[in-house]
Amino acid sequence: MARYLNPGNAGFESAVHSEIYVDKTLLLEFTNRVIGTEQRWLCVSRPRRFGKSITAGMLAAYYGKGCDSRELFRGKKISEKKDFEKHLNRYQVIHLDIQSFKRNGETAGQLLDRLNADVIAELREAYPDMVSLDEAYLPTVLAIIHDRTGDSFFIILDEWDFIFREFKRDEKAQEAYIDLLRGLFKDEESKRFVKLAYLTGILPIKRYESQSALNNFREYTMTSPKGLAEYIGFTEDEVKALCREYEMDFAETRRWYDGYAFSRAGHIYCPNSVVNAMFDGEFGSYWSNTAAFSDLRSYICLGYDGLEEAAVRLLAGEKCKVDIGSFQNDMTSLKRRDDVLTMLIHLGYLAYNNEQKEVYIPNEEVRRAFEIAVNDTDWNPVIETLADSEALLKATLACDAVNVAEGIEKAHMRNASILKYNDENTLRCVVRLAYYSAINEYVIFDEMPGGTGYADLVFLPRQHCKKPVLIIELKWEESAVGAIGQIKKRKYMDRLKEYSGKILLVGINYEKDDRDKKHTCVIEEWEK
């Protein structure tokens, strides 16, 4: 069995026979639709640990000659479709993991030379006497084979963007790689010998100015997954089924690994993290142990105007507007705040709401990575605020209004150099940042509707947490007493129909024109 040409089904067999396997074979129904059509050029990008290699292995196992995968797909969703038999193990498949060609100390040019040489060597064995020994360019070899035999190929590139990630500054090597990809997928000859092309990696295809280097590809990304959204990760129904089977708390699973939401698929979860949590029987930061998270600090500290403030607001649980249009789909052409935020979407650090054009930290696992990254910066005001957050929450629960006012004031003053100081929305951000530790025990809502208005902040205790609800109303140059009065007058408590127990009404006011920039607080208990 060859390594690159029709490599068999061992990789997919390993996935299918694992204790936890989620059936994503209906992706094959989609790829079957586009075989040999103008839509056969597919690039599906997603973050590390989101099942890219398993998907590539599934494609090779299903389409590739040289193996019989009927039993592997028996009982799977694709086996129920009418075209299942038509395409099963009928094609010549070339499956390449670009990263596997890398050797320590070698250049990108040497990697490309090895790729061409190794794949051509296998093709010579499969098609003897068709390709001369001095032919060293893979697209030409595939064209020759097609002309002489009529054979077409399925080409699957896993980690297709490895050269752009590993050799970030080697523009010459990147251009050579793009030229190779054009020869494989863009030239007129490639339209004859490619039956289907499937690229998978982290980044979308490199753009030059406003044009994709391979603009014949249909791209499915973390900002626009289109009809393939449900194959980006695990769906909510799939995760609920796993939680039932492994007797794991779904609400806690959602808190740790949810957050990537797409209009056509709903909530999507990180597959690697969910599988590890189910298998181990405990929640933790599984994805954050990968090498990708070591880069987070360097990106959020690049110093572009507004980037530091955006990172702090995101850490505080806010959403930030972002323009994804200027991102060039590589790791070096970063010129402004929004380029960095867009790259963090593709890397999985941030989730993106396509309708609102906003980014946010998706879940607890990623939030902890952001916290670690910030603690490794010189943003001392933020670090000190996070360290003080537990004491502030304790003061609030003890109805110690004096210390709460002092804690909020300290957080506000500390972070004035990062956040725009005199802004009502910033006061909400400061409060959320100051109560950072509360996220472990509370679900925090902004502008929560209730009664005849919207409460600024509502802290609802998580399941099994016995702490009281917090309703926080913020005032700007008015009074903390007036904030409490507004909570009562507009009956914000009425929103909590399913809750019974203690509610703390917290009114906070800030006098921006006061010389001491004084914050005041009033806390009242309310029983429901």
Image: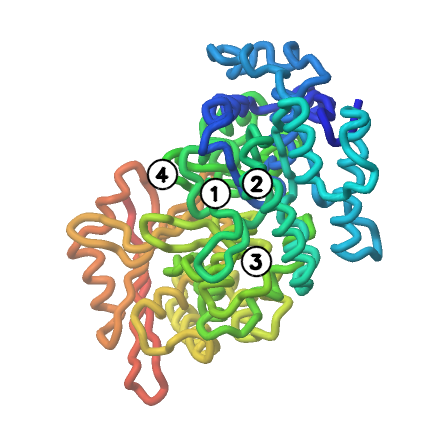
Q: In this view, does 357 lie above or below 497?
A: below
Quick check: can you spot residue 54?
Answer: yes
Nearer to the camera, 304 or 181: 181
The residue beneath circle 3 is 330
The N terminus lies in quadrant: top right
Residues at marks 2 and 1 touching, judged by CB atoms closer than 8 Å: yes
Pinpoint residue 209: horizontal percent, then vertical percent: 47, 62
Name the residue at 59% across, 64% down. Answer: 332
Secondary structure of the residue carrying tag 2 is helix
Q: What residue type is labelled 1?
A: Asn
Q: Mark 2 points at which residue?
A: 185
- Above or below — where is 133 with respect to 202? above
Of the residues under marks 2 and 1, which one precedes in the sequence? 2
Tell me residue 55's x, y (percent).
60, 30
Name the mark on residue 263.
4
CA gap, disc 3 and disc 1 = 19 Å
Front: mark 1 or 4: 1
Q: Which amino acid does label 3 sit on?
A: Asp
Between 278 and 118, the one lying in front of the other is 118
Q: How crowded is mark 1: few (under 14 residues within 10 Å), some or many (20 or more)?
A: some
Q: Which of marks 3 and 4 is in front?
A: 3
